[in-house]
């Protein structure tokens, strides 16, 4: 981290980028670092490969986020990406930047940058950005605090997942002290969903199946079209599938326009779903992982069950 701070202090023009289909941690860590570097008078361009999901667009700064970039940068800082491929079609341009810094909390991180700051014990990349800003003696203001708290809150499922620990609460306490508003943020993220998101959740629950100890559901393009919903409207649906006392593994298939599927897996206890995600070219954490795949969902379920030795 010391070297990263030295590099940040030394250089002038920064690109900050996080992963496709950005979640709360991708948006929160990008904005937190963006506001932090602006405070020390750096030139900063924040980028996400796709548009910011509507549930996070209330955060200050989201309007500044670009979906592409041009021009010269001294440093590219990649956040919350275990694999540089997660920046999608921006990878080629990103690799042209002379100095790359990789800040992440995924245990499956490929250490692809010149400087890699990876801490799998951290709840979120947002928590690591807080550490970095504090170590660099950059003052935390309300914008930074709200952005980073959103990342902490969403990556821990509202401070419930196994990655929630003493350090998570210490970070949250610090952020609240410097202006984060927990009730406002949880209302905005969890209680302001469009009706179509509830309808797509209803459809996923209606189509739920249980096989070999796995609960799964498949949302097709037609399901999304029927409600005028998009993939981001199904965020959080897999958490519902994981609430049953009859299974320890939940899987949600979300079909994309091109017919392939985005697969989200959740597990309980020491059932590790990241290895099977890695096998399919994805990644994630022990209890939450995902991948993109072409093929028949029923076959993929069978294969996952073989890999995980389900009952
Ligand atoms: P999700 O199911 O999309 O909420 O993702 C759960 C976890 O798996 C997150 O930590 C993601 O970073 C990771 N993940 C999901 N999809 C992919 C993918 N295609 N490649 C790498 N990691 C993924
Ligand atoms: Mn993420
Ligand atoms: Mn994260």
Image (spheres, rainbow, N blue to C red):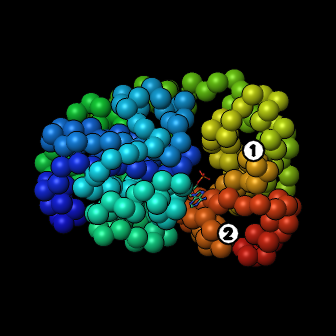
Q: Name the residue tied to disc 2.
A: 280
Which one is in front, 35 or 188?
Answer: 35
- Residue found 29% across the figure and 63% down from its top: 98
Which one is in front, 37 or 88?
Answer: 88
- Residue found 30% across the figure and 70% down from its top: 114
Q: Quadrant of residue 234?
A: top right
The C terminus, quarter of image = bottom right
For the residues carrying marks 1 and 2, which lies nearer the camera in this image? 1
Compared to residue 293, the image places residue 143 above or below, namely above
Classify residue 164 as left or right of residue 216: left
**How many C-alpha atoms fall within 10 Å of the one at disc 1: few (<14), some, or many (≥20)?**
few
- Residue found 63% across the figure and 68% down from its top: 281
- Residue found 57% across the figure and 26% down from its top: 191
Classify residue 255 as left or right of residue 232: right
Classify residue 145 as left or right of residue 58: left
Which numbered disc flags the more N-terminal residue, 1 or 2?
1
Q: Are marks 1 and 2 in contact (CB under 8 Å)?
A: no
- Does residue 296 appear in the picture of this structure? yes
Q: Quadrant of residue 123?
A: bottom left
Question: Which disc is residue 100 wearing?
Answer: none
* Residue 297 horizontal/vertical position (percent): 82, 59
Q: Name the residue tied to disc 1.
A: 257
Whether disc 2's CB lies below 8 Å from ligand 1 is answered: no
Q: Secondary structure at mark 2?
A: loop
* Residue 216 horizontal/vertical position (percent): 79, 54
Which one is in front, 84 or 286?
Answer: 84
The N terminus, quarter of image = bottom left
Structural distance between the alpha carbons of marks 1 and 2: 20 Å
* Residue 19 horizontal/vertical position (percent): 49, 52
- Does residue 272 appear in the picture of this structure? no
């Amino acid at each position: 981290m010391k070297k990263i701070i030295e590099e940040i202090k030394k250089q002038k023009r920064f690109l900050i980028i996080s992963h496709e289909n950005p979640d709360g941690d991708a948006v929160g860590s990008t904005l937190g670092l963006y506001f932090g570097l602006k405070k020390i008078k750096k030139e900063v361009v924040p980028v996400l490969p796709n548009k910011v999901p509507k549930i996070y667009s209330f955060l200050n700064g989201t309007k500044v986020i670009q979906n592409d970039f041009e021009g010269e940068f001294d440093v590219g800082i990649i956040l919350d990406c275990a694999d540089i491929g997660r920046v999608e079609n921006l990878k080629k341009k990103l690799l042209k930047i002379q100095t790359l810094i990789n800040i992440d909390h995924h245990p499956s991180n490929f250490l692809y940058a010149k400087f890699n700051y990876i801490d799998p014990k951290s709840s979120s990349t947002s928590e690591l950005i807080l550490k970095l800003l504090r170590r660099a003696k950059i003052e935390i203001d309300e914008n930074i605090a709200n952005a980073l708290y959103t990342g902490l809150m969403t990556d821990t499922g509202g401070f419930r997942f196994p990655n929630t620990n003493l350090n998570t609460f210490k970070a949250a306490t610090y952020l609240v002290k410097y202006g984060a508003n927990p009730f406002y943020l949880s209302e905005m993220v969890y209680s302001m969903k469009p009706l179509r998101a509830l309808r797509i959740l209803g459809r996923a629950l209606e189509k739920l199946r249980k096989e070999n100890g796995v609960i799964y559901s498949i949302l097709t393009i037609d399901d999304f079209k029927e409600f005028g919903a998009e993939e981001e409207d199904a965020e959080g649906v897999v958490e519902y599938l994981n609430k049953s006392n009859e299974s320890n593994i939940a899987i949600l298939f979300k079909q994309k326009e091109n017919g392939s599927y985005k697969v989200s897996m959740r597990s309980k206890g020491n059932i590790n779903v990241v290895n099977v995600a890695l096998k399919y070219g994805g990644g994630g954490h022990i209890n939450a992982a995902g991948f993109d795949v072409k093929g028949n969902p029923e076959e993929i379920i069978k294969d996952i069950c073989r890999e995980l030795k389900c009952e």
